[in-house]
Amino acid sequence: MENSLEESKFKDPFDELLDSNTKLRKMNIAKQTVRVPYNIDSSVENSSYIEIMGSNHENEPDSSKEMYCPSDSISTPCDKRLGAALFNCGLSPITRLNLEGFEASSDKCPDTKDANSNVYLKIPFLNINASPNKCSNFGKRRLSKSNKMDTVVHPSIVLKPGKWRKSLNNFIRTKITEITFSKKVARSSICQDRKSLVLKGEQKFEDKFEEEVLKYCDQCIPLPFIAAYEQHKLLNTKKIGEGAYGEVFRCSKYQKGLEKHVSNIVLKVIPLEGSIEINGEKQKTFSQILPEIIITKKMSNLQRNKTNSTDGFVNIHKVSLVKGKYPQHLIKLWEKYDEEKGSENDHPKLFGDNQLFVVLELKFGGSDMANFQFLNSEQSYYALQQIILALAVGEEEYQFEHRDLHLGNILIEYTNRKHIIFTLKNRNLTVLSRGVKMTIIDYTLSRITINNCCYFNDLSSDEELFQATGDYQYDVYRMMRKELKNNWSSFSPKTNILWLSYVIVKLLDSVKYKSINTKVHRMYIDKIKELQNIIMTFESATHCVNHLFNLNQNVNQKSIERAHPFGTNSLLDR
């Protein structure tokens, strides 16, 4: 056995990396070149590059570098300029990244515009004992001693379509788990905290946000959670959804004064003012939940407005402020949902006796568009008309922009009503229902003006959202930022058009249809495509409605009303 090799000689390089006794520093990983994988999920076809002046290191000469800017890239897959051998992975293409905490490569990178070029990135040894403060600067701009701007560019964040907040929180949790430091790493080093809804204009609330919330709840003090929502008061209760904000339950409830009439409602339970983080986010405060309550009530009341009227926004029955532990019967429903579908939220058992919740009781609006199956494209075409008209009514009455109208925020239910009637600037407008009724929900990112007071969500520094890829939805956020010039308080109804363009794209390539091999389906697919070709030429949903209904034509209104018994203008024949 004297001639046998040492045990270490049998180890391949990967085994050596796993060996705790391996002398990594002597291996000098920093000098090894590693091929950078591309992926098809985030388009290099539409990626852009920015010129950065300066260097991350004092001992390197100042130079001008081109760097990949993922925040301006388009998520639509494209392989026109990519090589044949592509890696199918969940990361965006990483090219020429100049990241703080990493050594810069002295080698010149190949021209990434050449499809057949091999792109290389030198990866140094990462010191896990580095100060957390060092990492907190990751992704930020700073001035070097030469007073020239250095820029550190984030790689793209690939999120699922729909409820991006949940997907983003999962991404953050994953990254925090993957990165281990000798000291605790603050969440802000991975991702900035979400900006809150802020008030602009009148400052009438001052520090009385809790009083205002109680006022909208018609309460003087918070109610006991368990007593307010006892099991016998709720019929056929089940959990139907969740979000970073909290839990959603569906139930039937006797209407007050009408014991024989049962209405289907949705309970949106939102934890409030607590010190512990829930579902990866800080709990909302009274100042943050108040605008959401006001917007929901105002949009719900549009169905009773005479000048601009629609029932296309979710109807709110009641708002309650409650206190205490989660009711046991709701906990069981949460656990059942977790067993059947898997919950991504924290278990509600962690809430204590002093925890506050706002409970929004909303009318059940059906299934979201992402999970709904249309009969054919004729049905989806008239559903689209309802969405356009609802947005137009909101624009005219409250300078409303939804700003987050993905398929998860559009609910669809079956209806026996043959026509859906809207009122826009005192004109009655009617569309065929074709058996479906649309409802718009979730005003978390919405912008609205009420009594000279502007409510909006300031996303000006919310970089992680604008770096997201994976669906056209995330391109719309970047398009909104460009349209608003990053001033999120300004009124620009063009953002509603951007989201309508998104909905049209989804109607053509994502939503489910039952009957696709019919003449009617093909005909209305062509109609949707015709609208797609012109949708971006409109400046607002109201502008789009004017075109669809020919409202700009000088016609005799009374003669039209006699010709159209359902209203001033109609899309029945369109």
Image (spheres, rainbow, N blue to C red):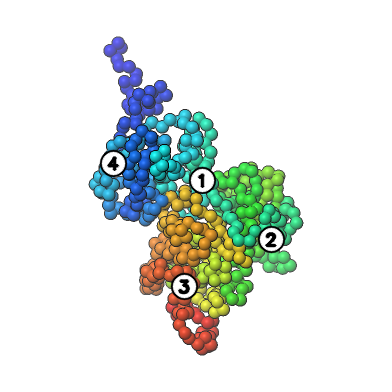
The residue carrying mark 3 is: 543
- Which quarter of the image is occupied by the N terminus? top left
Q: Indicate the position of residue 361 as horizontal and vertical percent values.
A: 64, 60
> What's the mark number on residue 192?
1
Q: Name which of mark 3 and mark 1 comes first in the sequence.
A: 1
Q: Please tell me which residue is depicted at 72% across the width and 68% down the height of the picture.
A: 258
Label 3 and label 1: CA atoms lie apart by 37 Å
Q: Name which of mark 2 and mark 4 comes first in the sequence.
A: 4
Label 1 and label 2: CA atoms lie apart by 32 Å
Q: Indicate the position of residue 201 as horizontal and vertical percent values.
A: 60, 61
Label 2 Cα neighbours within 10 Å, binned few <14 / some 14-19 / many ≥20: some
Label 2 and label 4: CA atoms lie apart by 60 Å
| Residue 373 visible in the shown view | no
Amino acid type, callout 2: Tyr
Please say if the residues under marks 3 and 1 sit with CB atoms less than 8 Å apart.
no
Viewer-nearest residue: 570 or 129: 129
